[in-house]
Amino acid sequence: FTKPPPPTIKEPVSGLGRAVTGAFVILLTRAFDDSFDTEIDFEDAERLIPVLDMLNHNSEPSIRYSTNEEGTVEVVARRDIEEGEEIYNRYREEEETNMPYHRFFSRFGFVPGITEDMKNLLEDKSSIFFAKRKEV
């Protein structure tokens, strides 16, 4: 006797799997902590904040943001900003020191303070790309 082939599982809508994966990646890499919003009960609440997610990271950001009582995000300069100067945000300050390099890299696409050439890091099997068992 031969076994019948396993049933073919099809997506209910063509491309749904790719769309869900894409949405997950967007949330993972572009969401901001919203724990300051008192109407959200979740401990690790996050949400997308258009435009704010386009700012680059700097350990000394030029802006800060918060949510007011109406739920509107307010962005305020931390210092005087010159005309034409790039505006910076800081990505998850606490995670810069606590998050393993490979997770920070996979989430944000860089690791603060690492300036070595990516090719060298890959060839050396750096922990930025290759997690150690205890870090996973």
Image (cartoon, helix red, strand yellow):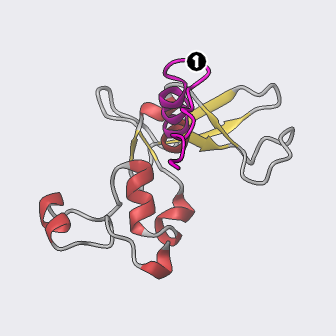
Residue visible at 83% across and 41% down in the picture: 40
Please determine whether, in this image, residue 75 is positioned above or below residue 12: below
Q: Quadrant of residue 16?
A: top right
Residue visible at 55% across and 27% down in the picture: 10
Residue 44 magenta: no
Magenta span: 1-26
Please state the horizontal and vertical placement of residue 105, each as a whole percent of the image. 37, 57
**Closer to us: 105 or 68:** 105
Residue visible at 40% across and 78% down in the picture: 132
For this view, does 19 lie left or right of residue 129? right
For this view, does 110 lie left or right of residue 40? left
Instruction: Please tell me whether mark 1 sits on a helix, a strand or a loop.
Output: loop
**Closer to us: 88 or 21:** 21
Residue 5 magenta: yes
Looking at this view, name the residue that lies furthest to the front: 1
Looking at this view, name the residue that lies furthest to the bottom: 134
**Closer to us: 116 or 5:** 5
Please determine whether, in this image, residue 25 is positioned above or below residue 118: above
For this view, does 66 lie left or right of residue 29? right
Residue hosting label 1: 13
Please state the horizontal and vertical placement of residue 95, each as a whole percent of the image. 53, 63
Q: Does any portion of residue 77 appear in the rendered image?
A: no
For this view, does 48 lie left or right of residue 120? right
Looking at this view, name the residue that lies furthest to the top: 13
